[in-house]
Amino acid sequence: MPPAAETASRPSRPRLRAAAGAALLTGVLFALASRLAGSHPLGDRTRNIVDLGQQYLPYHAYWRSLLLGETHGDLFLNWNSGFGSNFLGDLGTYLSSPFALLVVAFPADRPELALYVVTALKIATAGAAMAALLLTLRRGPWPLAALLGTAYALSGWTFNYGAGVPMWLDGLIAFPLLCLVGEWARKDRRPVLGPLVVALAWTANFYTAHMATLGAAVVLVLRLLTAEDAPAGTRRAGLAAVLRAARTVAIGLGLAAPLVLVVFLGTRSADPTPPTAFAPAAWTEVLARFLPATASVSSPALFVGTPALALALTLPFNGAVPGRVRAGWAAAIVLVTLSLQWEPTHLLWHAGASPNGIPYRQTFVLCGLLLTAAWLSAAGGVPRPLALLGGAGTLALLALGAAGSVDIDRWTYPAAAGAAALAVLAAAAALRARSRPAGRLLPVLAVGLLLTAQAGETLVTGKRIEERQLAGVSWSPRIGPWHTDMAAAVAAHDAWPRHRTDPGEVPGGNDVLLVGGEGADYYSSLTSETYSRTLAALGFGYYAKGRHPVSLDNPVTDAIFSIGTRMRSTPAGPPALDRLPEATIEVADGPVPPLVTVRPGPPAVGPRPGSAADTAFARQERMLGSRVYEVPDAPRRTATADGSALTANCPAGSEVWFWAPDYRGTAALAGAASAAPPAAFAGKPPSVRAPMRRLGTVPASGAVRVELTPDPEGRPRPRLPARPIGCLERHRLDTAVRELTATGATAVRTTGHTLTAELPPGSTGTAVLAVPRIPGWRCAAGDAPPEPAHRRLGLIAVPLDGRATTVTCSFRPPGLRPGAAIGAAGLLALLLTGLLERRRRSREPAGQREFTARAPAARSPENTPV
């Protein structure tokens, strides 16, 4: 190897070793923590807590199917969910990480294993990236860098938040990578690679990339102010570095714009969640989260390991580190910690909107700063005894201040004390090795003790957090026979696009993404307000404050949305943490109109709020175009021993349906031989809306008595609509279906994001597609030019003039065209940057380039190797 190349390769070898060591150690410890917790796939218990089972697992299963060409839709449109949803927006929210492509390497019935491997690889990559960053910031022993990289990847934030929200792990990777980009900008290096890294970070997950970018900006400012090789004294050099960093970020954001802009506009049209007022956590709870085995979603997860935290706390007392480094990093850590607790900076971290749920999603940045401080203090050798005492004393005060926190676990103080004891032994061995530099046993012993302390505490933390989460939050069962049997049944009966097939309720959520079909179930951060409000008005239920509409087993809405095959499943027992019961599946086929029907007149308007027509029953009739219900006026309400009862009169033989979206309890039809079992309602406004339920058949007397038994946790006197009872007359519905079928489309064809319907000659009025009119649809009748689709009661509508015999509608995600234009401009800027850099380097004297390649790094207290 030529001397210049040999010299240039030396700095990269420790980084490669540290990155590889951190990745390996992180992966092993993460797997061991899963095994200790007994979670799948290394145990029997489900790990599908909250949205991991409801959203992220189904999306990864669907992503595999789409990549293998097994779905009806494409990258633009998902025909399976939400009666037709914006898939590119969901892709950019949940699936745009390169790691998500790995799902194709796993069998269709093992999506949980695929997602676990993706999660583990992301966490290991974050550890490797942080280890490489640390050795870039300052020379030091690569084993220590690997250990601190592992501490970053397996922080409390990862176990408590990131492992359950795999998309956020891309931000965990992005932070050290973007800090490297800042270093390149500071040193005027890699002007082409830098924007590509920024683009990758923002494409993988723009939400946490925003936080990582802010954190990297903090690190860049610190490096400009404190690094030993910072530009000597001129503001011009520092300003130039800042401008290079801004250019890098601007080009990277431009390259990511085609996807980021689609997600941004999708968020603007999404069903809004109730505004959240930020309430800072008590400082006792904040201090407790630095300690092991603590879990909470209302305070910042700051655990990085007692040994690593102790090293970080030695920095202010470590006289071997230059004063401006100590002052700058200590001040930055304090200010960033305070920024977690102040509402204006809280909003800045979260892109201007206080999130529902976890309010401290940016905590991984502070964890990274703490571990960087630990590296800066220890990279030049074990801190002196005075610095160690200062760090230990500060740590003791922190642990004392956390006493009494509700987040403290029975394992917290024992685990911290054990790790601290091992860390003290490691420090003693390292100090002894300093006075006897010829021996190798003591340094190895010190590293081993430190590794044991950090690893043991991490395993305890991972195990306890997972156990506490399963005990305290909602969870979904593992994939099992219920899912696989339903998927087989759906595949055997799917007749798309002749009509839809709805799998009904399958445990987990986002059913159609797991088992197939074209049902109503849909859960996304981008669930359109149009879709959510349209279904809620028709009597559908929802979870997640409207962003998770669920299927409604109702023959009128089946006719409206052309659901010709409906699956109903009866489980053998309740789901458990370690198993999913088998279920009996019933397949019900029935005649329904085609996906495209023709209605007389122009698109209709909705009923006046508060009027007699402002009920779910009346809205179903308006959307169907026929009267099929008898709705009694103001049923009489009387008190009973267990709750209350509603009495009314309906036509004999009609079906009784009960609509009470805010009600929590059971409702039963009394005094009827054909009454159904009591129907459960789980309304809990504003987060949960109960769907309409069938109670049975009206007896020959025509008398209807609905007995209500409220849940003890619900309202003592439940709030009900003025007209909660509707009696469906099936013969009227059958007539309406025949009429809509006779005048509707004679054939319907769909491609990835386009629907074409052939209509009877001479059709006039309005063609109505059983598809929600979400933003992005454009339609044309016959040979007319496409234009933005009209709306009829929330569905796509196309005016007809009697001459057109076809209707064609196509979906393009909003923001795609301007995003593509911005992306093209970003690509042009990147190419221009590369061209200018190549020209600059070609003009550089050969001797200067050779000197730069050969010159060793400057030796200073900050970068002197151990």
Image (cartoon, grey):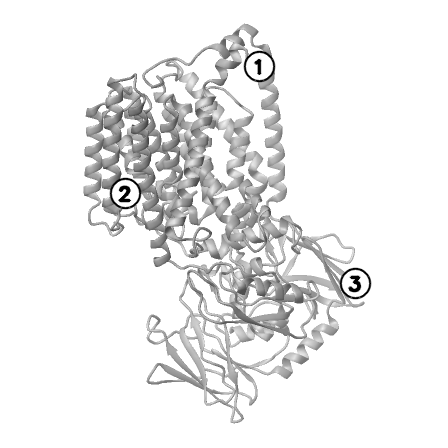
Q: CA distance from mark 2 to mark 1?
A: 51 Å
Q: Earlier in the sequence, mark 2 or mark 3?
A: 2
Placement of 594 over or under 420, stated as above or below:
below
- The residue pinned by badge 2 equals 291
Separation of disc 3 and disc 1 at Cα? 63 Å
Kindly give the residue lying farthest to the bottom in the view shown.
Answer: 701
Residue at the (20%, 29%) spot, across then down? 390
Q: Nearer the viewer, residue 611 or 405?
A: 405
Q: Which mark is residue 840?
A: 1
Which amino acid, mark 3?
Thr
Residue 509 vertical position relative to residue 138 in the rendered view, above or below: below
Camera-nearest label, 2 or 3: 2
List x then y, in percent, for residue 162. 42, 45
Label of residue 805 in the image: 3
Label 1 CA crowd tier, 10 Å (few <14, some 14–19, many 20+): few
Q: Looking at the image, is 851 positioned above or below residue 691?
A: above
